[in-house]
């Protein structure tokens, strides 16, 4: 039989009455709170008892204090004399219990309680939510900007989709928590001034729980996306940066507390460690990426299985003289492959070579967005190389719905954008294809 257990509790920081009722029920079931953290609460087994609990907030306390401030020690002594025993303490947050049948309340003035909670909230929870909100908005805008510029690339990654979803949910959570708290504060202040009562109904708790649930689901999806992605160890390292930095910074902070380092110096050292560790780990990710990076070169056998179209499918090219560079990204919205079938020896400029990208669109609503981006990108890529434009051609030779031939000046270099119902191909022939070869290429790409 376990004598301790840990639980994740879903309470708003200012939900004093809700936490008190919960702790009283736990005591009746034989569990006493012993530790409060931002991640879990810890309980120890006791003889079931009917106890009263009181949650209080002490503004001067800090998570960086090596010892309790003098004012907090005096406050705890006062509560002890009044029959309230400290069960657990976490910086500005204390949980007391009393075995008396009708104990004298620690705090009796509702207006003072509301003011005290507000001061603590503004220094801790509100500030944290505001910082997280700005971070979420920054990340969301950055990722949306990348999608706007290259939707056919970014939307082919489940990681990108899950990151956008993650920060959207984080932004929603922050806004709901901030609005919920200030709504509660307005109502609590009004009730305290009106009749001296304490307003004990937190606002928007169910919204926060729902957002947290979807955040967890999204995090699982993000981890899955990293595991199955082609990034491999690089993706795993990038994902691990945040939790590793958090764990190490907590370890540094707690070690400095154990050594008795003053609060201000501890705070400065911890924030400096977070900054340095973040740069070190991000630099490590980039360094490992450079060392292990490749251009997705496959053997002939692998490429023949993966690539839908090769030069040897169209011409009598000697396969042993070619190497294939193959890349693939797929998500719930897009499936995108990029293939370059080129000569190992670049000296033979007359030998046929092939470069193409095939984007399969799984959601009709983003088809035109992807096509517009592809057309714009191909035209912009030729900026400064004389006039650039795309001319629509007869799609029947490609068995397609639309076909555009890309020109540089007055010349076409056999660059095409081919649109079928559910896919878009960007294909460049480094030779002059015949009608039969174009038809064979169209059938291969259309049936893939």
Image (cartoon, rainbow, N blue to C red):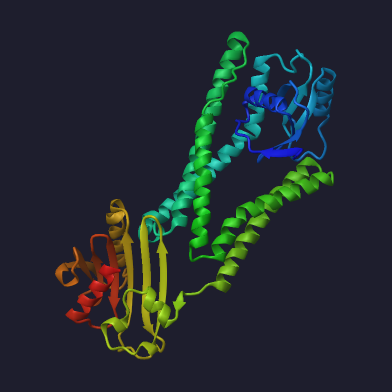
Residue positioned most to the front: 1
**Percent position of residue 253, x then y:** 75, 47
Q: Is residue 70 left or right of residue 92?
A: right
Residue at 66 percent of width and 53 percent of height = 245
**Depth check, front residue: 304 or 276:** 304
Residue positioned most to the top: 195
Residue at 56 percent of width and 21 percent of height = 201
Position of the C terminus by quadrant: bottom left
Q: How many marks?
A: 0
**Residue 239 vertical position relative to residue 390 in the rendered view, above or below:** above
Residue 81's image quarter?
Answer: top right
**Depth check, front residue: 255 or 9:** 9
**Residue 259 vertical position relative to residue 56 in the rendered view, above or below:** below
Q: Is residue 255 left or right of residue 129?
A: right
**Percent position of residue 343, x then y:** 38, 86
Residue 393's image quarter?
Answer: bottom left
Residue 258's image quarter?
Answer: top right
Position of the N terminus by quadrant: top right
**Percent position of residue 157, x then y:** 43, 59
**Depth check, front residue: 271 or 444:** 444
Residue at 71 percent of width and 14 percent of height = 108
Q: Is residue 45 visible?
A: yes
**Percent position of residue 190, x then y:** 56, 15
**Residue 218 vertical position relative to residue 314 in the rendered view, above or below:** above
């Amino acid at each position: 039989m376990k004598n301790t257990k840990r639980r994740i509790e879903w309470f708003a920081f200012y939900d004093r009455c809700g936490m008190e009722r919960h702790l009283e029920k736990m005591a009746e079931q034989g569990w006493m709170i012993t530790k409060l953290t931002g991640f879990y609460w810890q309980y120890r087994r006791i003889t079931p008892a009917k106890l009263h609990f009181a949650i209080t907030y002490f503004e001067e306390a800090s998570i960086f204090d090596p010892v309790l401030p003098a004012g907090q020690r005096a406050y705890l002594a006062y509560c002890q004399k009044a029959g309230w025993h400290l069960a657990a303490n976490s910086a500005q947050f204390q949980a007391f219990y009393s075995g008396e049948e009708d104990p004298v309340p620690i705090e009796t003035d509702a207006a003072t309680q509301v003011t005290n909670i507000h001061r603590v909230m503004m220094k801790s929870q509100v500030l944290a939510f505001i910082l997280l909100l700005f971070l979420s908005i920054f990340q969301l805008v950055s990722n949306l900007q990348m999608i706007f510029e290259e939707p056919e690339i970014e939307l082919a990654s489940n990681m990108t989709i899950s990151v956008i979803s993650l920060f959207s949910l984080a932004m929603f959570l922050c806004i709901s928590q901030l609005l919920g708290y200030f709504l509660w504060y307005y109502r609590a202040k009004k009730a305290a001034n009106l009749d001296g009562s304490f307003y004990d109904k937190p606002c928007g708790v169910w919204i926060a729980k729902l957002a947290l649930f979807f955040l967890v689901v999204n995090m699982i999806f993000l981890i899955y996306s990293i595991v199955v992605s082609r990034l491999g160890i690089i993706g795993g390292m990038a994902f691990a940066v945040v939790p590793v930095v958090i764990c190490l910074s907590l370890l540094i902070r707690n070690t400095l507390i154990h050594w008795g380092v003053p609060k201000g110096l501890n705070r400065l050292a911890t924030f400096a460690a977070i900054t340095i560790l973040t740069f070190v780990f991000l630099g490590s990710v980039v360094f490992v990426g450079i060392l292990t990076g490749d251009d997705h070169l496959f053997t002939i056998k692998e490429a023949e299985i993966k690539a839908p179209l090769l030069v040897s499918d169209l011409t009598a090219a000697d396969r042993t003289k070619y190497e294939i560079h193959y890349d693939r990204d797929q998500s719930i919205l897009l499936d995108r492959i990029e293939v370059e079938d080129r000569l190992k020896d670049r000296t033979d400029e007359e030998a046929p070579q092939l470069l193409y990208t095939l984007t399969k669109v799984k959601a009709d609503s983003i088809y035109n967005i992807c096509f517009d981006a592809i057309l714009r990108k191909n035209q912009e890529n030729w900026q400064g190389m004389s006039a650039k434009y795309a001319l629509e051609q007869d799609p029947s030779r490609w068995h397609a719905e639309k076909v555009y031939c890309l020109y540089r000046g007055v010349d076409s270099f056999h660059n095409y954008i081919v649109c079928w119902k559910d896919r878009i191909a960007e294909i460049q022939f480094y030779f002059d294809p015949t009608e039969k070869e174009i038809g064979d290429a169209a059938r291969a790409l259309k049936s893939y």
